[in-house]
Image (tube, grey):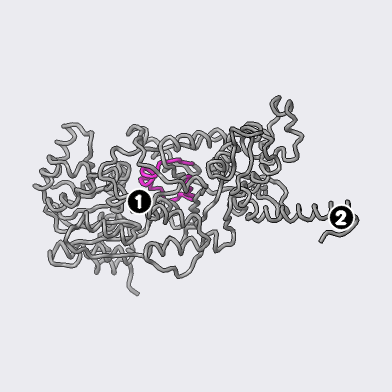
Amino acid sequence: MVSTMEIASQDPILEEAERSFGLSYLFPYQRLVISNVLEAMANPEALGRRQLVILPTGAGKSLCFQLPAVMIKEMTVVIFPLLSLMADQERRMQEGGIRCRVLRGGQSAEERTEIWKEADAGALRILLTNPETASGPEVLKRLSALPIGHIVIDESHCVAEWGETFRPSYLKLKEVVAALPAAVVTAFTATASPPILAKITEHVFGSAAAHLIVGNPDRSNLRYSVLPTLSKDATLISLLSPHPPGAPADLCPPSASGELRPPSAPADLCPPGLQRPALIFCATRKRAENTAMLLRERLGEDEIRYYHAGLSREEKKRIEDWFFQSPNGILASTTAYGMGVDKANIRSVLHRDVSPSIESYLQESGRAGRDREPAEAVLLFSPSDTAPRGAPNSANSPTTANAEPPDYTEQRRLAMLAYAAGSDCRREHLLRLLGHELEFCNGCDVCRGTAVHEAPELPVLLRFVARNARALTLDEAVATASGERSHFVFSRGLHLRRDYGCLSTMHPDEVRDCFTVLENGGLLARPGRSLFPRRLRLTAAGRARLRLSPAGRARLRLTHISQRQSRTRRTGEPAA
């Protein structure tokens, strides 16, 4: 039998992998990409001179440029979208004894001089930078004079995701590649649909043909779920509450008979709560902050932080170090900066807000389970998510110049909404949009039979309003449904109403959010000019939705039976 050491001695790639990274095995796609890079360095006419590589999150993409970097004499330049990713790579390289430096904005003249001195002396194996820095005239001039063997664009889907919206420097990458004397150019991404691939090719390789290497994008250890909800705050608290084993979830669905009971997330997700560490993606900085503060207050825990671009470099570093070390931390992050969180044992990724595209969602949910152990990817979905989105938020986007065509953006958003609202296999839906076929699904709520296709609190609130039509203002409805015990409630006799406390497991603010979502969705109304001004009532759409819900149909059947029994008592004859 041939030993691993003997195989390594016959295989220079594996030998270097074991010496520099302690690895005794390479995945087939890793070996293919690395071999292409090395062959192209030796032969400019080789197939791998231009590569576009699609490997799923956690498949070891970084090794595909780290290993060649220590095997070639020329320097490797890696372009990242985020400073946090650059810092993480620098840390990993330094731990492995590989000389690596970061070239970014905000550095002093002394820092830059030291970096250029090391690069000129050939002491650097890897130089990490970003599009804005690499495309600067002075930096580009200095780089063009250096012996660069390999240019790497990591997370290259950002070329299409961000380049045509708020980071126009991504559109200059083609000029950067053309200006640098590199023998090999490789673009990496974890997910890309055919339109995204076309944009990456256009903005990185230009007219040059790129060799496409596509791995299986399916992350078989992830369980995908979509949770319809009217109150995302309440659902987050329920999912992340550390329920004691065997205890009922904080929230539970209405009964089949239509009796009013508190709503919930699926029972198989609630007790004993989603596993941690957990990462929550939010659309804006403010929402990330508010989500973290809400969870700290309601869960009564300290191991909860937020993370976004507005933090200082020192704050980001402190939070990154904390989260990497925390065995049960919860981190609320903006979508862009959450991509830089590279923690192998994240057990749950939750999306408080719907991602703008399938590619983004797969990238973000792929933060979970990078240790290949089972993990959860949960998307919270509310009727408010279907509202058209405006321009990028100025607090999160430096500029909106060169915005991509609205129809293209809208198509990608609608594809994501179709996933959230769909009733087919989640995994199959995601892979189909990427042009792949599913062999089998071993983990999604639809295939497990636990999918919820309607916010559980929806029929509860619709029935509540139907029973109290034109009787309650919004404040009175919130106080009644949440089961408040106050002078406001008792003085109005609200505690005597039949539906008092039907949403008592929810905070009054969350109940108010539910009513607001339904009103904005056109299911409720508070007409100002009527016999009952500002009193809640169902709209025609609300009445139709109540009739369509399973619990609503059950309630209507009970009402019909009750009416028949009432007529029988009055007339003494059975109703027709």
Choose between 235 and 198: the one closer to the eye.
198
Task: Identify residue for label 1.
Answer: 409
Position of 401 compared to 149: left or right? right
Q: Percent from the top left, x then y, of residue 170? A: 24, 47
Residue that protrudes farthest toward the bottom in the picture: 1
For label 2, the residue is: 568
Image coordinates for residue 150, horizontal then vertical, percent: 18, 55
In the image, taking residue 136 as reference, residue 57 lies left or right, namely right
Mark toward the start of the polypeptide (1 vs 2): 1
Q: Nearer the viewer, residue 432 or 473?
A: 473
Instruction: Name which residue type carries label 2.
Output: Thr
Residue sitting at x 79%, y 56%: 561
Number of marks present in the image shown: 2
* The quarter of the displayed image where residue 43 is located: bottom left
Residue 459 in percent (x, y) is at: 64, 49
Q: Nearer the viewer, residue 371 or 499?
A: 499
Is residue 344 a member of the stretch shown in magenta? yes
Image height check: is 413 above or below 493?
below
- The C terminus is located in which quarter? bottom right
Is residue 370 in sight in this rendering?
A: no
Depth check: give the residue in front, 28 or 504: 504
* Amino acid at pointer 1: Thr
- The reply to whether the C-beta atoms of the residues labelled 1 and 2 are less than 8 Å apart is no
Magenta segment, which residues?
A: 330-352
Q: Is residue 166 magenta?
A: no
Instruction: Kindly identify the residue that appears in the image at 13 percent across and 46 percent down.
Output: 143
> Image height check: is 226 above or below 514?
below
